[in-house]
Amino acid sequence: MALYELKEVQQIKNLEFMAKQVVEGFIVGLHKSPFHGFSVEFAEHRLYNPGESTKNIDWKVFARTDKLFTKRYDEETNLRCHVIIDTSSSMYYPSKKDVINKLNFSVLSAAGLIELFRKQRDAAGLALFSDKVDLITKAKSNIVHINGLYHEMEKLLANEKLNKTTHAASCLHAIADQIHKRSLVIVFSDMMQQENSEDIFAALQHLKHNKHEVILFHVVDRAHEINFDFDNRPYLFVDMENGAEVKLHANEVKAKYATHMQAYENALKLKCAQYKIDFVAADINKPFNQVLTPYLLKRTKMI
């Protein structure tokens, strides 16, 4: 699964189409991997029995095999999945026009997950937050609802939020209060905020109430945001959330910065482990299977 270039993201208005492309590539990869026995389809085929209704005949399979097969649907799993996306201004990094940014990556990953939910008849809900909760939906599996989720995420790709700060702790608490039935909760965030780290950790713990299972995708441009791999020259760095500027030579702060960011990421990992939250470092420069595979592994433990 190759990553989409940002220009492709902007040109394709149908996020559902893009999600299908991501998932189809992922499924092909599964069949070539140790997960080859791992079914990601909610339906399997069996030979058609004369006298049965013809509405579930798979005519594409018939065209290939010259035999009549019907789709056999499993019972509803009733697994509820809630996707939470941080939409604050820092998620629009990198701001270059020719590369994918953290929000693009998160939206495309979320769309791919929703396509997998649909294939397995799992209910999907969506929450968006920045300095406040901008959207929260119930988890449903009907096609009208799913199309509505794609539409909300398409709007994120079209409209950049400028100088939007992150109040992750208060927003995650508010969202957790709205998820009542046991669910799989999936969070996409760079976890970069001005709030106290302990407040963030408390909010993550709150997401575990009602026996929810939680996956935190820590979305970063690892080369630049964690390792600080910039050319050895002066830069003007601008805070995307408050507009603050600082001029400095990259090599002057690289070691100290990288040490600080690695310590923060390690603290996140430790807290997530303590709360039994799955922590996944998601690098925007790597393929989407780093998101889709952890979901499938978690799902098998829940059903």
Image: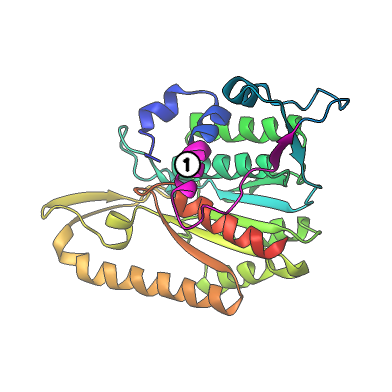
Whether residue 48 is situated above or below residue 42 in the rendered picture: above
Left or right of residue 97, residue 174 in this image: right
Whether 42 is among the magenta residues is: yes
Q: How is the image coloured?
A: rainbow
Left or right of residue 141, residue 10 in this image: left
Q: In which quarter of the image is the C terminus?
A: bottom right
Which structural element holds mark 1?
helix
Q: Find residue 72 and report its horizontal and vertical position in percent.
A: 76, 39
Left or right of residue 154, residue 56 in this image: right
Could one spot residue 170 in this view of the protein? no
Whether residue 94 is situated above or below residue 63 in the rendered picture: below
Q: Residue at x 49, y 46 (%)?
A: 106
Outermost right residue: 51
How would you rate the neighbour count of disc 1 (Cα within 10 Å): few for under 14, some for 14-19, many for 20 or more? Answer: few
Residue receiving disc 1:
28
Q: Find residue 296 and report its horizontal and vertical position in percent.
A: 59, 55
Whether 11 is among the magenta residues is: no
Q: Which residue is drawn at 49% across and 47% down?
A: 31
